[in-house]
Image (cartoon, helix red, strand yellow):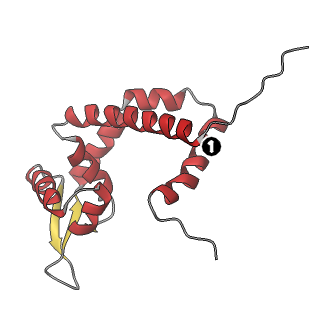
């Protein structure tokens, strides 16, 4: 009838390479869209990380940078009206970063303008999209250190 295809299971290094390549391509698309709105990729990433209000120190953790770097990032976002700082209710020394409606709108535009990413996702079948979402949802907690260990 037809030829039987054998599937070779990728090794961990092969999976790491393809995942890194996908991440890099996504990041380039994101950075280019952010630049069209006058933002660095770090500033745009910070907007995405404060969809829920977050303390400055926690934002540094989410961005994988030093707390002193976050100050400059948030200063820029504040100067553009995309985010602002508030004192935490329980401890006024703790500053909370809050995205503004304008910040949400800009983040939506950035994500909407990621043409290569949209093209890649739109080329997938519904089943592939469901599978990708499921796989990413399974891998992300482990990679981010938020996985719940089995009891």
Question: Can the viewer see residue 113 in this picture?
Answer: no
Picture coordinates of residue 150, whole percent (x, y): 63, 72
Residue 143 sits above or below residue 118 on the image: below
Q: Residue at 21% x, 66% y: name it.
A: 56
Query: Residue at horizontal 27%, vertical 36%?
Result: 31
Residue 25 x %, y %: 39, 31
The quadrant of the image that shows the N terminus is top right
Identify the image quadrant of residue 68: bottom left
Query: Which of the pair 31/11 is nearer the observer?
Result: 11
Q: Position of residue 67 (x, y in %)?
A: 18, 63
Q: What residue is pinned by disc 1?
A: 130
Q: Is residue 150 left or right of residue 146?
A: right
In the image: residue 40, left or right of residue 112: left
The answer to whether residue 100 is visible is yes
Q: Residue reaching furthest bottom?
A: 90
Depth order, front residue of 98/146: 146
Work out whether 30 lies above or below 103. above
Rendering quarter of residue 75: bottom left
Classify residue 69 as left or right of residue 50.
Answer: left
Mark 1 neighbour density, 10 Å: few (under 14) some (14–19) many (20 or more): few
Q: State the image coordinates of residue 59 (x, y, percent, origin top left).
A: 26, 62
Quarter of the image where the C terminus is located: bottom right
Q: Work out whether 25 lies above or below 97.
A: above
Give the residue drawn at x 41%, y 27%.
116
| Among the 4 quarters of the image, the one containing residue 57 | bottom left
Q: How many marks?
A: 1
Left or right? Give the position of 94 relative to 52.
left
**From this viewpoint, which residue is outermost toward the right?**
1
Q: Is residue 31 above or below residue 143?
A: above
Q: Measuring 45% from the left and 63% from the top, which residue is drawn there? A: 145
Q: Tell me the element at label 1.
A: helix
């Amino acid at each position: 009838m037809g030829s039987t295809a054998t599937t070779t299971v990728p090794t961990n290094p092969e999976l790491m390479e393809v995942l890194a390549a996908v991440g890099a391509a996504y990041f380039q698309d994101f950075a280019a869209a952010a630049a069209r709105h006058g933002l660095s990729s770090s500033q745009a990433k910070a907007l995405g990380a404060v969809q829920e209000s977050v303390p400055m120190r926690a934002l540094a953790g989410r961005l994988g940078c030093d707390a002193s770097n976050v100050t400059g990032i948030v200063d820029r976002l504040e100067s553009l009206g995309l985010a602002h700082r508030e004192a935490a209710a329980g401890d006024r020394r703790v500053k909370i970063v809050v995205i503004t409606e304008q910040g949400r709108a800009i983040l939506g535009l950035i994500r909407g303008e990621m043409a290569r990413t949209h093209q890649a996702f739109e080329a997938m079948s519904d089943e592939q999209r469901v599978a990708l979402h499921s796989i990413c949802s399974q891998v992300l907690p482990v990679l981010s250190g938020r996985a719940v260990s089995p009891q």
